[in-house]
Image (cartoon, helix red, strand yellow):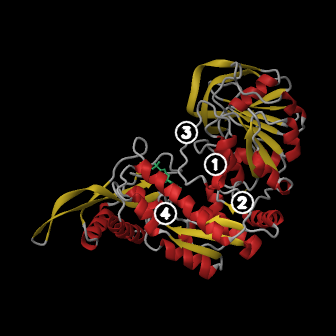
Amino acid sequence: MSICVNSWFDIFKGEMQRYETILILDFGSQYTQLIARKIRECRVYCEIVPFDISIGEIIKRKPKGLIFSGGPAGVYEEKAPHCDKEIFRLGLPILGICYGMQLMTHLLGGKVEKSQHREYGRTTLIVDKKRPLFLNLKSKKLLVWMSHGDKVVKLPPKFVHLAHTSNSPFAAMMDEEGKFFGVQFHPEVAHTQRGKEIIKNFLFNVCNCSGNWTMESFIQSSIKKIRQRVRNRRVICGLSGGVDSSVTALLVHRAIGNKLSCIFVDNGLLRVNEKEEVIKTFCENFHLNLHLVDAQERFLKRLKGVIDPEEKRKIIGEEFIKVFTEEASRIGKTDFLAQGTLYPDVIESVSYKGPSAKIKSHHNVGGLPEVMPLSLIEPLRELFKDEVRLLARKLGLPEEIIWRQPFPGPGLAVRILGEATKERLNILRQADFIVLEEIRKAKFYHRLWQFFAVLLPVKTVGIMGDERTYENVIALRAVTSEDGMTADWAKLPHKILGNISNRIINEVKGVNRVVFDISSKPPSTIEWE
Ligand code: XMP
């Protein structure tokens, strides 16, 4: 595998050195991102890099320490991912986690074997030596999360063991110099007690980090980078009103002011007040140069008679690109396109795809960079979503934008099953707004990952006053989730459900029935499409 450290590294080269950096070599664990998040929470900057990163590349980045992630392979397997053995001569502290510990053992002359018993799930760890990894932990016993089949049966020369479990005599180890560490368990997962303390001990007591990664320092260095790169040229940015594109636009605006032009496309598939909020926030409060394109009729015309959800997505994506490029050409000569790409998407492209790799579908309207020969500016490429929210707050964005729920690029069209007509969009929009109002009133907004209304393609019989009705059904969707990859249907109190149902049926003309979706993901998805 080549080291696809991407053009963004070149862009930010030099700047990177402002922060103390930890490099995480990715051996394919499903938890690699969690390691990165935990480290960032400790205010230490870190990056995930491929396991076969060259020694030269590591030196160039001047890290304070390295972490070897876990991974699904066994070190003795023919195709097991191995790093360059020279890595141990760099003089850098290294922490190996699970597979990372086994690899360290294997490369440094110890022995790893298949275990009789797979250790999976919570296990009690007995700490035998506290310094420096288990410093400050009051108890000698910790519940830790294990997930391994192989285990270390002989330590490498000049290593000592730090902890054991009933199944693993060497559940944690370090070399005599106190540079190389291995833990068989996963300190990065929430199930491991005091896991963050253990990571902190490595960062601050072993690597001597000071914790200089803050949003304030990020803003300052981003602004500088953007200015240096753009100089007198122009940048365009597609603004959707979501937190990622909003933060991107504000950051670029802070750096280059009116040389940034933002384009907001009203495709007619937006929710109540969305356009108005964007205008208020970005034009009135922040004075951004905003081009508002009213393309409602164009989108609706192309969606006429279209029922298939994939077809809808395709049409909306194509039309968006057309509208956007037309508007961009009106703006005049532009050199850059600013996008709100986040770190998890970057990791997707650099991480080692072991057998446990997640398959993630990319939903957003892509294709712009291909049709527009512009260089990309992606100031959020290093950030996780929660960091983007912190940044949003620092930049003064309103709470509604900071906490805006994920909203599909194709908008309400995917929440109308069947044809998306103007009339049906109006029905859905009103119902959706009632859901929002009632959830806010009940103070449930922050407890849910997403909630929304869906308009079904069936009509049912009802009775209003003395008259029989034959009208639409609205389905209510409300889920809790960590990341949208899996989700539970939310156990909303009956009172809230009752209020929502009453209000929709009374206030939205054309609806005589409301149902509540009680399916989780998987096997269902969050959106109905
Ligand atoms: P599903 O329906 O696949 O959705 O369970 C998972 C999450 O992705 C959101 N979603 C999108 N987000 N552009 C986005 O930015 C899209 O086209 C898109 N489609 C679905 C969905 O709302 C949920 O949070």
Residue at left offset 71%, top offset 49%: 39
Observer-nearest residue: 415 or 478? 415
Q: Which mark is residue 446?
A: 4
Observer-nearest residue: 510 or 48? 510
Could you tell me which secondary element the residue under label 2 belongs to? loop
Give me the C-alpha separation between circle 1 and circle 3. 12 Å
Q: Mark 4 vs mark 1: which is more N-terminal? A: 1
According to the image, label 1 marks what residue?
345
The N terminus: image quadrant: top right
Q: Mark 4 vs mark 2: which is more N-terminal? A: 2
Residue at left offset 44%, top offset 64%: 269
According to the image, label 2 marks what residue?
379
User: x, y (%) of residue 376?
Assistant: 71, 57
Could you tell me which secondary element the residue under label 4 belongs to? helix
User: x, y (%) of residue 161?
Assistant: 76, 29
Q: Mark 1 vs mark 2: which is more N-terminal? A: 1
Labelled pair 1, 2 in contact (Cβ < 8 Å) = no
> Residue 470 falls in which quadrant of the image?
bottom left
Residue at left offset 85%, top offset 41%: 57
Q: Say few, some or many: other residues with alpha carbon within 10 Å of mark 1 (under 14 / 14 to 19 / 20 or more).
A: some
Q: Mark 1 vs mark 3: which is more N-terminal? A: 1
- Residue 131 visible here: no
Lateral position of residue 90 relative to residue 281, left or right: right
